Image (spheres, rainbow, N blue to C red):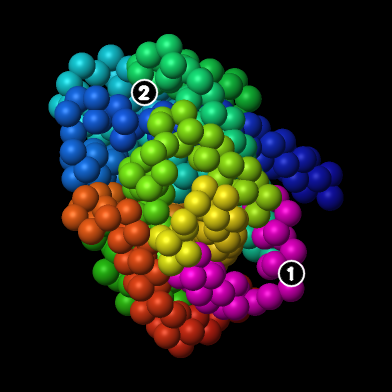
Amino acid sequence: MTVRSRGGSRDRYALAVLLVVVFIDLLGFGLIIPLLPYYAKAFGAGGTQVGLQLASYAAAQLVGGPLLGRLSDRIGRRPVLLVCLAGSCAGFLLLGLARSLAMLFVSRILAGLTGGNLPVVQAYVADVTPPRDRAKRMGLIGVAFGLGFIIGPAAGGLLSRFGAAVPAFAAAALSALDLLAAFIWLPEPGSFARSRSGHGSPALSRGSVTQSAHPLLDLKAALLKPRVGPLLVSRFVFFLAFVIFQSIFPLYALERFGFEAHATAYVFSYIGFLIVLVQGAAIGRLTARFTERQLLVGGVALMAAALAAWAWAPTVPALLAVLPFIALAGGTFGTVNSSVISQSVGAGEVGGMMGLSASVEAMTRIVGPALGGALIERLGPAAPGLFGGAVLLGLLPYAWTRFRVTSRRRGA
Protein backbone atom coordinates (compact mmCIF):
# COMPACT_ATOMS: atom_id res chain seq x y z
CA MET A 1 0.00 0.00 0.00
CA THR A 2 2.83 2.38 0.75
CA VAL A 3 4.44 1.91 -2.65
CA ARG A 4 1.15 2.42 -4.41
CA SER A 5 0.41 5.60 -2.47
CA ARG A 6 3.86 6.95 -3.22
CA GLY A 7 3.40 6.22 -6.93
CA GLY A 8 -0.03 7.86 -6.96
CA SER A 9 1.34 10.98 -5.27
CA ARG A 10 4.21 11.12 -7.77
CA ASP A 11 1.80 10.80 -10.69
CA ARG A 12 -0.46 13.56 -9.34
CA TYR A 13 2.58 15.81 -8.96
CA ALA A 14 3.65 14.96 -12.50
CA LEU A 15 0.19 15.83 -13.83
CA ALA A 16 0.26 19.19 -12.04
CA VAL A 17 3.68 20.01 -13.50
CA LEU A 18 2.53 18.87 -16.94
CA LEU A 19 -0.46 21.24 -16.79
CA VAL A 20 1.89 24.15 -16.09
CA VAL A 21 4.14 23.07 -18.95
CA VAL A 22 1.17 22.87 -21.35
CA PHE A 23 -0.09 26.27 -20.20
CA ILE A 24 3.25 27.99 -20.84
CA ASP A 25 3.63 26.16 -24.16
CA LEU A 26 0.18 27.27 -25.35
CA LEU A 27 0.72 30.76 -24.00
CA GLY A 28 3.66 31.10 -26.38
CA PHE A 29 1.71 29.51 -29.22
CA GLY A 30 -1.26 31.79 -28.55
CA LEU A 31 0.98 34.85 -28.78
CA ILE A 32 1.61 34.33 -32.49
CA ILE A 33 -1.10 32.10 -34.00
CA PRO A 34 -3.74 34.85 -34.54
CA LEU A 35 -1.08 37.10 -36.06
CA LEU A 36 0.42 34.63 -38.56
CA PRO A 37 -1.96 35.46 -41.44
CA TYR A 38 -1.20 39.18 -41.07
CA TYR A 39 2.51 38.36 -40.77
CA ALA A 40 2.36 36.38 -44.02
CA LYS A 41 0.43 39.17 -45.76
CA ALA A 42 3.22 41.57 -44.81
CA PHE A 43 5.49 39.49 -47.07
CA GLY A 44 3.00 39.74 -49.96
CA ALA A 45 1.09 36.48 -49.41
CA GLY A 46 -2.44 36.11 -50.80
CA GLY A 47 -5.29 34.12 -49.26
CA THR A 48 -4.18 30.80 -50.73
CA GLN A 49 -0.55 31.38 -49.71
CA VAL A 50 -1.67 32.23 -46.18
CA GLY A 51 -3.52 28.92 -46.10
CA LEU A 52 -0.46 27.04 -47.40
CA GLN A 53 1.75 28.71 -44.83
CA LEU A 54 -0.55 27.51 -42.05
CA ALA A 55 -0.70 24.06 -43.67
CA SER A 56 3.10 23.72 -43.72
CA TYR A 57 3.17 23.45 -39.92
CA ALA A 58 0.61 20.64 -40.05
CA ALA A 59 2.48 18.85 -42.84
CA ALA A 60 5.56 18.76 -40.64
CA GLN A 61 3.46 17.50 -37.72
CA LEU A 62 2.12 14.74 -39.94
CA VAL A 63 5.68 13.40 -40.21
CA GLY A 64 6.98 14.26 -36.75
CA GLY A 65 3.94 13.59 -34.53
CA PRO A 66 3.68 9.80 -35.00
CA LEU A 67 7.44 9.35 -34.72
CA LEU A 68 7.53 11.33 -31.49
CA GLY A 69 4.54 9.44 -30.09
CA ARG A 70 6.07 6.03 -30.82
CA LEU A 71 9.50 7.16 -29.62
CA SER A 72 7.91 8.14 -26.30
CA ASP A 73 6.59 4.56 -26.00
CA ARG A 74 10.15 3.29 -26.32
CA ILE A 75 12.40 5.71 -24.44
CA GLY A 76 9.95 7.59 -22.22
CA ARG A 77 7.67 10.62 -22.27
CA ARG A 78 10.00 13.10 -20.57
CA PRO A 79 12.94 13.13 -23.04
CA VAL A 80 10.61 13.39 -26.03
CA LEU A 81 8.71 16.28 -24.44
CA LEU A 82 12.00 18.09 -23.90
CA VAL A 83 12.83 17.70 -27.60
CA CYS A 84 9.37 19.03 -28.51
CA LEU A 85 9.78 22.12 -26.33
CA ALA A 86 13.26 22.81 -27.72
CA GLY A 87 11.83 22.61 -31.25
CA SER A 88 9.09 25.08 -30.40
CA CYS A 89 11.65 27.52 -29.04
CA ALA A 90 13.80 27.28 -32.18
CA GLY A 91 10.78 27.67 -34.47
CA PHE A 92 9.55 30.81 -32.71
CA LEU A 93 13.03 32.32 -32.76
CA LEU A 94 13.39 31.72 -36.50
CA LEU A 95 9.92 33.18 -37.04
CA GLY A 96 10.98 36.41 -35.35
CA LEU A 97 14.09 36.56 -37.52
CA ALA A 98 12.18 35.85 -40.77
CA ARG A 99 12.70 38.44 -43.50
CA SER A 100 10.92 36.65 -46.33
CA LEU A 101 7.97 34.37 -46.99
CA ALA A 102 10.39 31.47 -47.52
CA MET A 103 11.91 31.96 -44.05
CA LEU A 104 8.41 32.08 -42.63
CA PHE A 105 7.69 28.67 -44.17
CA VAL A 106 10.95 27.24 -42.82
CA SER A 107 10.19 28.44 -39.29
CA ARG A 108 6.76 26.80 -39.29
CA ILE A 109 8.12 23.53 -40.71
CA LEU A 110 10.82 23.37 -38.04
CA ALA A 111 8.27 24.04 -35.29
CA GLY A 112 5.93 21.42 -36.72
CA LEU A 113 8.59 18.69 -36.91
CA THR A 114 9.60 18.92 -33.26
CA GLY A 115 6.89 21.02 -31.64
CA GLY A 116 3.94 18.65 -31.97
CA ASN A 117 3.86 17.54 -28.35
CA LEU A 118 0.13 16.91 -27.86
CA PRO A 119 0.31 13.12 -28.58
CA VAL A 120 3.08 12.76 -26.00
CA VAL A 121 1.15 14.86 -23.48
CA GLN A 122 -1.97 12.74 -24.00
CA ALA A 123 0.06 9.54 -23.65
CA TYR A 124 1.55 10.92 -20.42
CA VAL A 125 -1.95 11.61 -19.07
CA ALA A 126 -3.03 8.10 -20.05
CA ASP A 127 -0.02 6.69 -18.15
CA VAL A 128 -1.03 8.36 -14.88
CA THR A 129 -4.83 8.14 -15.14
CA PRO A 130 -7.25 5.20 -14.77
CA PRO A 131 -9.62 4.75 -17.75
CA ARG A 132 -12.72 5.96 -15.90
CA ASP A 133 -11.12 9.37 -15.22
CA ARG A 134 -9.28 9.77 -18.51
CA ALA A 135 -11.73 12.05 -20.34
CA LYS A 136 -11.95 14.34 -17.31
CA ARG A 137 -8.16 14.61 -16.98
CA MET A 138 -7.70 15.16 -20.68
CA GLY A 139 -10.19 17.94 -20.17
CA LEU A 140 -7.74 19.47 -17.70
CA ILE A 141 -5.18 19.56 -20.50
CA GLY A 142 -7.85 21.43 -22.45
CA VAL A 143 -8.18 23.90 -19.55
CA ALA A 144 -4.44 24.62 -19.64
CA PHE A 145 -4.74 24.89 -23.41
CA GLY A 146 -7.60 27.37 -23.10
CA LEU A 147 -5.90 29.48 -20.44
CA GLY A 148 -2.93 29.86 -22.76
CA PHE A 149 -5.29 31.04 -25.47
CA ILE A 150 -7.01 33.53 -23.15
CA ILE A 151 -3.79 35.33 -22.28
CA GLY A 152 -1.66 34.58 -25.34
CA PRO A 153 -3.66 36.17 -28.17
CA ALA A 154 -4.48 39.30 -26.15
CA ALA A 155 -0.80 39.70 -25.18
CA GLY A 156 0.21 39.03 -28.77
CA GLY A 157 -2.16 41.72 -30.00
CA LEU A 158 -0.65 44.23 -27.58
CA LEU A 159 2.94 43.24 -28.38
CA SER A 160 2.30 43.46 -32.13
CA ARG A 161 1.93 47.22 -31.70
CA PHE A 162 5.69 47.35 -31.03
CA GLY A 163 6.55 45.34 -34.15
CA ALA A 164 5.42 42.24 -35.97
CA ALA A 165 8.38 40.18 -34.73
CA VAL A 166 7.98 41.06 -31.04
CA PRO A 167 5.31 38.39 -30.29
CA ALA A 168 7.49 35.73 -31.93
CA PHE A 169 10.50 36.62 -29.79
CA ALA A 170 8.28 36.68 -26.69
CA ALA A 171 6.99 33.22 -27.61
CA ALA A 172 10.57 31.99 -28.03
CA ALA A 173 11.45 33.27 -24.54
CA LEU A 174 8.40 31.55 -23.05
CA SER A 175 9.30 28.30 -24.78
CA ALA A 176 12.81 28.48 -23.35
CA LEU A 177 11.32 29.01 -19.89
CA ASP A 178 8.98 26.07 -20.51
CA LEU A 179 11.90 23.85 -21.51
CA LEU A 180 13.79 24.78 -18.35
CA ALA A 181 10.75 24.12 -16.13
CA ALA A 182 10.14 20.70 -17.71
CA PHE A 183 13.83 19.76 -17.41
CA ILE A 184 13.89 20.60 -13.70
CA TRP A 185 10.46 19.51 -12.47
CA LEU A 186 8.81 17.08 -14.88
CA PRO A 187 9.46 13.42 -13.94
CA GLU A 188 8.95 10.34 -16.06
CA PRO A 189 5.44 8.88 -15.46
CA GLY A 190 5.65 6.39 -12.59
CA SER A 191 3.69 3.67 -14.38
CA PHE A 192 5.89 3.97 -17.49
CA ALA A 193 9.10 3.89 -15.48
CA ARG A 194 7.94 0.76 -13.62
CA SER A 195 7.06 -1.02 -16.86
CA ARG A 196 10.45 -0.21 -18.42
CA SER A 197 12.35 -1.36 -15.33
CA GLY A 198 10.83 -4.83 -15.49
CA HIS A 199 8.17 -4.49 -12.77
CA GLY A 200 5.50 -4.67 -15.39
CA SER A 201 5.15 -4.76 -19.13
CA PRO A 202 3.11 -2.51 -21.33
CA ALA A 203 0.05 -4.46 -22.31
CA LEU A 204 -0.41 -4.90 -26.02
CA SER A 205 -3.85 -5.17 -27.53
CA ARG A 206 -4.76 -7.82 -30.06
CA GLY A 207 -3.97 -6.73 -33.57
CA SER A 208 -1.17 -4.32 -32.75
CA VAL A 209 -1.07 -1.38 -35.11
CA THR A 210 2.31 0.12 -34.29
CA GLN A 211 4.81 -2.29 -35.82
CA SER A 212 5.78 -0.74 -39.18
CA ALA A 213 9.02 1.05 -40.01
CA HIS A 214 7.18 4.37 -39.85
CA PRO A 215 4.03 4.84 -37.77
CA LEU A 216 2.18 6.42 -40.73
CA LEU A 217 2.28 3.01 -42.42
CA ASP A 218 0.19 1.71 -39.51
CA LEU A 219 -2.67 4.11 -40.27
CA LYS A 220 -4.30 1.74 -42.76
CA ALA A 221 -4.32 -1.08 -40.20
CA ALA A 222 -5.77 1.26 -37.57
CA LEU A 223 -8.53 2.41 -39.91
CA LEU A 224 -9.58 -1.23 -40.46
CA LYS A 225 -10.03 -1.91 -36.75
CA PRO A 226 -13.76 -1.87 -35.90
CA ARG A 227 -13.49 0.49 -32.94
CA VAL A 228 -10.49 2.69 -33.70
CA GLY A 229 -11.25 3.09 -37.41
CA PRO A 230 -14.55 5.01 -37.05
CA LEU A 231 -13.00 7.20 -34.37
CA LEU A 232 -10.13 8.19 -36.68
CA VAL A 233 -12.38 8.71 -39.72
CA SER A 234 -14.76 10.91 -37.75
CA ARG A 235 -11.82 12.81 -36.24
CA PHE A 236 -10.56 13.66 -39.72
CA VAL A 237 -13.93 14.90 -40.99
CA PHE A 238 -14.80 16.79 -37.81
CA PHE A 239 -11.47 18.57 -37.56
CA LEU A 240 -11.41 19.35 -41.26
CA ALA A 241 -14.50 21.50 -40.70
CA PHE A 242 -13.18 22.90 -37.41
CA VAL A 243 -9.70 23.71 -38.74
CA ILE A 244 -11.19 25.64 -41.65
CA PHE A 245 -12.98 27.80 -39.07
CA GLN A 246 -9.93 28.14 -36.84
CA SER A 247 -7.35 28.94 -39.52
CA ILE A 248 -9.47 31.18 -41.73
CA PHE A 249 -11.15 33.12 -38.93
CA PRO A 250 -8.68 36.06 -39.09
CA LEU A 251 -9.34 36.51 -42.84
CA TYR A 252 -13.08 36.03 -42.26
CA ALA A 253 -13.05 38.68 -39.52
CA LEU A 254 -11.06 41.04 -41.73
CA GLU A 255 -13.42 40.73 -44.70
CA ARG A 256 -16.73 40.50 -42.83
CA PHE A 257 -16.15 42.99 -39.99
CA GLY A 258 -12.90 44.81 -40.88
CA PHE A 259 -11.02 43.49 -37.83
CA GLU A 260 -7.36 44.40 -37.42
CA ALA A 261 -4.80 42.04 -35.87
CA HIS A 262 -5.34 43.13 -32.27
CA ALA A 263 -9.14 42.84 -32.53
CA THR A 264 -8.83 39.30 -33.90
CA ALA A 265 -6.44 38.45 -31.07
CA TYR A 266 -9.02 39.59 -28.51
CA VAL A 267 -11.65 37.34 -30.10
CA PHE A 268 -9.22 34.41 -29.87
CA SER A 269 -8.82 35.20 -26.17
CA TYR A 270 -12.60 35.06 -25.83
CA ILE A 271 -12.52 31.64 -27.54
CA GLY A 272 -9.83 30.55 -25.08
CA PHE A 273 -12.07 31.61 -22.19
CA LEU A 274 -14.87 29.51 -23.67
CA ILE A 275 -12.53 26.51 -24.00
CA VAL A 276 -11.67 26.79 -20.30
CA LEU A 277 -15.36 26.81 -19.37
CA VAL A 278 -16.08 23.79 -21.55
CA GLN A 279 -13.07 21.71 -20.50
CA GLY A 280 -13.08 22.72 -16.85
CA ALA A 281 -16.79 22.78 -16.07
CA ALA A 282 -18.66 20.87 -18.75
CA ILE A 283 -16.64 17.79 -19.77
CA GLY A 284 -16.70 16.05 -16.39
CA ARG A 285 -20.45 16.55 -16.01
CA LEU A 286 -21.23 15.53 -19.57
CA THR A 287 -19.18 12.32 -19.40
CA ALA A 288 -20.90 11.42 -16.12
CA ARG A 289 -24.37 11.88 -17.62
CA PHE A 290 -24.10 10.75 -21.26
CA THR A 291 -22.46 7.86 -23.08
CA GLU A 292 -19.47 8.52 -25.28
CA ARG A 293 -21.53 7.68 -28.37
CA GLN A 294 -24.08 10.34 -27.44
CA LEU A 295 -21.36 12.93 -26.82
CA LEU A 296 -19.52 12.19 -30.06
CA VAL A 297 -22.64 12.27 -32.24
CA GLY A 298 -23.99 15.30 -30.38
CA GLY A 299 -20.70 17.12 -30.88
CA VAL A 300 -20.87 16.55 -34.64
CA ALA A 301 -24.49 17.77 -34.85
CA LEU A 302 -23.86 20.86 -32.72
CA MET A 303 -20.75 21.83 -34.69
CA ALA A 304 -22.62 21.51 -37.99
CA ALA A 305 -25.31 23.92 -36.79
CA ALA A 306 -22.82 26.32 -35.17
CA LEU A 307 -20.62 26.60 -38.27
CA ALA A 308 -23.65 27.38 -40.42
CA ALA A 309 -24.65 30.09 -37.94
CA TRP A 310 -21.08 31.44 -37.95
CA ALA A 311 -21.18 31.72 -41.74
CA TRP A 312 -24.19 34.05 -41.64
CA ALA A 313 -23.44 36.02 -38.45
CA PRO A 314 -24.58 39.55 -39.42
CA THR A 315 -22.99 41.48 -36.53
CA VAL A 316 -20.17 41.16 -34.02
CA PRO A 317 -22.59 40.44 -31.11
CA ALA A 318 -24.16 37.65 -33.20
CA LEU A 319 -20.69 36.25 -33.88
CA LEU A 320 -19.82 36.28 -30.17
CA ALA A 321 -23.10 34.48 -29.43
CA VAL A 322 -22.26 31.66 -31.87
CA LEU A 323 -18.71 31.02 -30.66
CA PRO A 324 -19.72 29.31 -27.34
CA PHE A 325 -21.49 26.58 -29.30
CA ILE A 326 -18.42 26.03 -31.49
CA ALA A 327 -16.26 25.79 -28.36
CA LEU A 328 -18.67 23.36 -26.68
CA ALA A 329 -18.89 21.10 -29.73
CA GLY A 330 -15.14 21.14 -30.41
CA GLY A 331 -14.13 20.60 -26.78
CA THR A 332 -16.58 17.78 -26.20
CA PHE A 333 -15.87 15.86 -29.40
CA GLY A 334 -12.09 16.28 -29.27
CA THR A 335 -11.70 15.28 -25.62
CA VAL A 336 -14.05 12.28 -25.73
CA ASN A 337 -12.61 11.08 -29.04
CA SER A 338 -9.04 11.18 -27.65
CA SER A 339 -10.08 9.46 -24.42
CA VAL A 340 -11.77 6.56 -26.22
CA ILE A 341 -8.84 6.13 -28.62
CA SER A 342 -6.38 5.95 -25.71
CA GLN A 343 -8.47 3.17 -24.15
CA SER A 344 -8.67 1.15 -27.36
CA VAL A 345 -5.06 -0.12 -27.29
CA GLY A 346 -2.63 -1.52 -24.74
CA ALA A 347 -0.47 0.67 -22.52
CA GLY A 348 2.61 0.07 -24.66
CA GLU A 349 0.88 1.47 -27.74
CA VAL A 350 -0.80 4.57 -26.34
CA GLY A 351 1.90 7.00 -27.50
CA GLY A 352 1.96 5.53 -31.00
CA MET A 353 -1.83 5.54 -31.31
CA MET A 354 -2.12 9.11 -30.04
CA GLY A 355 0.53 9.99 -32.60
CA LEU A 356 -1.62 8.42 -35.34
CA SER A 357 -4.60 10.38 -34.04
CA ALA A 358 -2.55 13.57 -34.17
CA SER A 359 -1.48 12.70 -37.72
CA VAL A 360 -5.10 12.39 -38.78
CA GLU A 361 -5.74 15.81 -37.30
CA ALA A 362 -2.55 17.14 -38.93
CA MET A 363 -3.91 16.05 -42.31
CA THR A 364 -6.86 18.37 -41.76
CA ARG A 365 -4.43 21.18 -40.96
CA ILE A 366 -2.75 20.60 -44.30
CA VAL A 367 -5.97 20.52 -46.32
CA GLY A 368 -8.17 22.83 -44.24
CA PRO A 369 -6.27 26.16 -44.31
CA ALA A 370 -5.57 25.98 -48.05
CA LEU A 371 -9.17 24.93 -48.78
CA GLY A 372 -10.57 27.61 -46.49
CA GLY A 373 -8.34 30.26 -48.03
CA ALA A 374 -9.50 29.32 -51.52
CA LEU A 375 -13.18 29.27 -50.45
CA ILE A 376 -13.06 32.70 -48.85
CA GLU A 377 -11.02 34.15 -51.71
CA ARG A 378 -13.38 32.91 -54.44
CA LEU A 379 -16.81 32.63 -52.80
CA GLY A 380 -16.75 35.11 -49.93
CA PRO A 381 -16.55 35.00 -46.10
CA ALA A 382 -19.65 32.79 -45.64
CA ALA A 383 -18.31 29.92 -47.76
CA PRO A 384 -15.97 28.24 -45.19
CA GLY A 385 -18.71 27.97 -42.56
CA LEU A 386 -21.30 26.65 -45.00
CA PHE A 387 -18.85 24.10 -46.36
CA GLY A 388 -17.92 22.90 -42.86
CA GLY A 389 -21.56 22.60 -41.81
CA ALA A 390 -22.41 20.58 -44.93
CA VAL A 391 -19.46 18.21 -44.41
CA LEU A 392 -20.50 17.52 -40.81
CA LEU A 393 -24.11 16.89 -41.80
CA GLY A 394 -22.77 14.22 -44.14
CA LEU A 395 -20.78 12.72 -41.22
CA LEU A 396 -23.83 12.37 -38.94
CA PRO A 397 -25.29 9.12 -40.39
CA TYR A 398 -21.85 7.46 -40.32
CA ALA A 399 -21.26 8.57 -36.73
CA TRP A 400 -24.69 7.40 -35.58
CA THR A 401 -24.27 3.91 -37.05
CA ARG A 402 -20.58 3.29 -36.27
CA PHE A 403 -20.18 4.65 -32.71
CA ARG A 404 -21.56 1.65 -30.87
CA VAL A 405 -18.92 0.91 -28.22
CA THR A 406 -18.13 3.08 -25.19
CA SER A 407 -15.17 2.97 -22.81
CA ARG A 408 -17.10 0.59 -20.60
CA ARG A 409 -16.06 -2.14 -23.02
CA ARG A 410 -12.42 -2.64 -23.92
CA GLY A 411 -11.05 -3.89 -27.22
CA ALA A 412 -10.11 -2.17 -30.45
Q: Which residue is mark 1?
A: 288
Q: Residue at x 48, y 84 (%)?
A: 400
Cα separation, mark 2 vs mark 1, equals 40 Å
Quarter occupied by residue 35:
top left
Q: Is residue 171 visible?
A: yes
Would residue 389 be found to the left or right of residue 3 on screen?
Answer: left
Amino acid found under the numbered disc labelled 2: Phe
Residues 387 and 369: in front is 387
Residues 217 and 369: in front is 369
Would residue 283 be found to the left or right of residue 263 on screen?
Answer: right
Magenta stretch containing residue 280, yes or no? Answer: yes
Q: Which residue is mark 2?
A: 92
Magenta stretch containing residue 361, yes or no? Answer: no
Secondary structure found at label 1? helix
Q: Is 253 rendered above or below residue 390? A: above
Q: Residue at x 31, y 35 (%)?
A: 37
Q: Is residue 222 visible?
A: no
* Bounds of the magenta segment: 279-306
Q: Position of residue 100 (x, y in %)?
A: 17, 21
Amino acid found under the numbered disc labelled 1: Ala
Secondary structure found at label 2? helix
Majority SS type along the magenta span: helix
Q: Residue at x 51, y 20 (%)?
A: 158
Q: Position of residue 310 (x, y in %)?
A: 46, 59
Q: Residue furthest front?
A: 314
Q: Is 344 rendered above or below residue 115? A: below
Question: Which of the marked residues, 2 or 1, is nearer the chain's N terminus?
Answer: 2
Q: Position of residue 227 (x, y in %)?
A: 45, 77
Q: Residue at x 48, y 25 (%)?
A: 157
Q: Residue furthest top?
A: 162
Report crowding for label 1: few under 14, some 14 to 19, many 20 or more residues within 10 A (C-alpha): few
Quarter occupied by residue 134:
bottom right
